[in-house]
Amino acid sequence: MSLPQKTVFIISDGTGITAETFSHSVLSQFTEHYSFKQIREPFVTTVDKIKEIIARIDEIAETDSPPIIFSTMVDQELVDYMRHSKGIFLDIFGACVNTLELSLQVRSNPTVGRSHLDASSEAYHKRIEAINFTLAHDDGQFVHGLQEADVILVGVSRSGKTPTSLYLAMQYALKVANFPLIPEDFERGQLPKTIQPFRHKLFGLSIQPERLSEIRGERRPNSKYASLEQCRYEVAEAEHLMRMQNITWLSSTTKSIEEISTTVLQILKLETHKY
Amino acid sequence: MSLPQKTVFIISDGTGITAETFSHSVLSQFTEHYSFKQIREPFVTTVDKIKEIIARIDEIAETDSPPIIFSTMVDQELVDYMRHSKGIFLDIFGACVNTLELSLQVRSNPTVGRSHLDASSEAYHKRIEAINFTLAHDDGQFVHGLQEADVILVGVSRSGKTPTSLYLAMQYALKVANFPLIPEDFERGQLPKTIQPFRHKLFGLSIQPERLSEIRGERRPNSKYASLEQCRYEVAEAEHLMRMQNITWLSSTTKSIEEISTTVLQILKLETHKY
């Protein structure tokens, strides 16, 4: 049985990224009853543009069924147009802003596009620097400047260090280096020398050997590197080393990049956002 | 005059990333009246944990002022505890879910942690592949597999190609390659040969010469590469080349990574999310 389809409009005066993420969370609670088709309308700032979008919404409402509208628009004139469309209008910040105005006894000041960092701001500059640092310090390739790192991820090859590093840099402007743990380290029973002085910044990623073997096999099929035996050996040794060295680690096997990153922040108690 | 400070709790049964982004947008509307101190509490799934958090909230409410609580919790028992704390409770999905239940005449099915992709899912796998592809195809370093690319960004060195590529890969699971446009290309008056067959996937980034000179100067101070004269020459030539070749481009000078990425999606009409 196929589910009825609803059209969903994401309308924003900015990128619409916040509205999009939010809409996914809300709509995932209705996927037993409907499938959803998303139309994203970013950078909507004029009456002409909103009228054009509303015409499409009204047409879908008449010929099919009323679309759902997730809006983060703040211009009251444009919001009023949308309220009178034939769609199901959801002002995603509205209820929370109203509650806060009442509780705090102050008026809000809606300003277009405050959700994202301004490209000329100090914070934005820090973010680009963090991304560049993280790229330069991927996979132990560059050992200078490690004293500047906020985090150093360690783990066997293909345990998820690179995507996690990039996410932390992109989302939180953290400078993240990552280092592979390799058989030479296990034989010595020591961390790579270059990262020994930075033990307080280390966080480990581990992974189930079976999953690791799958991932490595995609890259180098039938190699020793991808064999289950080798993966078992490396994972056991890496976990042993991390335990000996008192490094907190988690298993990335069933975790998303977001979940791993959140845990890293939580455990290393990293300061991230400032208002 | 310093503003009064409010403590803000971000409480989630998942990572809290959606709640955090949302809270920034809402609180930015109140920064004329308050400064905010954020405490993020991810992975809250037990009564013991929520009681411990509420004890801290209540203490702050009594000794200072009631904290603001942004919650994406779905477990009704835990939500009920929070509603009876002394904080200002904001259930960020609540109002929208209620409106949709009424409009669609169905019950929602709240399920913990649906906001992010499951690490074992097909979609998640695609995302990791996209990140790996994008890293391998950064800065024109690897020319094989370009037929698999969803987007190929072009522009002069340091015009913002790399952060934009990584963001599109991370957020939208798009395979993004990027290629520098260099003086040799301008002399030939041609795009690099390897990307000529993929003109429909190309998107250009440009930048103000003054800003480019600043950015390059941080990396290589007092070099010809960073000189305003060289930057002016390269930007003018790159824009001329893109115009001749009919490549859409935008200026990254005052735009955030999110704004650039949104525009790329919009103009190339790329399909991104599926429900």
Image (cartoon, coloured by chain):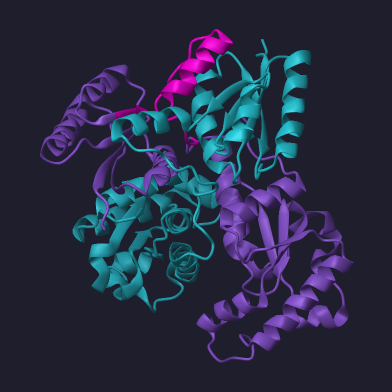
Chain colours: A cyan, B purple
- Residue A55, given in percent of the width and then of the height, sits at 77, 26
Task: Decide if residue A220 is in sight here.
Answer: no
Left or right placement of residue A75 versus residue B243 in this view: left
Height in image: B37 above or below B161?
above
Left or right placement of residue B61 versus residue A201 in this view: left
Closer to the camera in the image, A272 or B271: A272
Height in image: A9 above or below B155?
above
Q: In which quarter of the image is residue B21?
A: top left
Q: How many labels does the image show?
A: 0
Residue B105, magenta (yes or no): yes
Q: In which quarter of the image is residue B254?
A: bottom right
Closer to the camera in the image, A142 or A9: A9
- Residue A165, given in percent of the width and then of the height, sits at 43, 58
Left or right placement of residue A219 versus residue A258 in this view: right
Image quarter hosting the N terminus of chain A: top right
* Magenta-drawn segment: B89-117
Q: Residue at x 53, y 17 (%)?
A: B100
Q: Quadrant of residue A148?
A: bottom left
Task: Decide if residue A114 is in sight here.
Answer: yes
Height in image: B221 above or below A261?
below
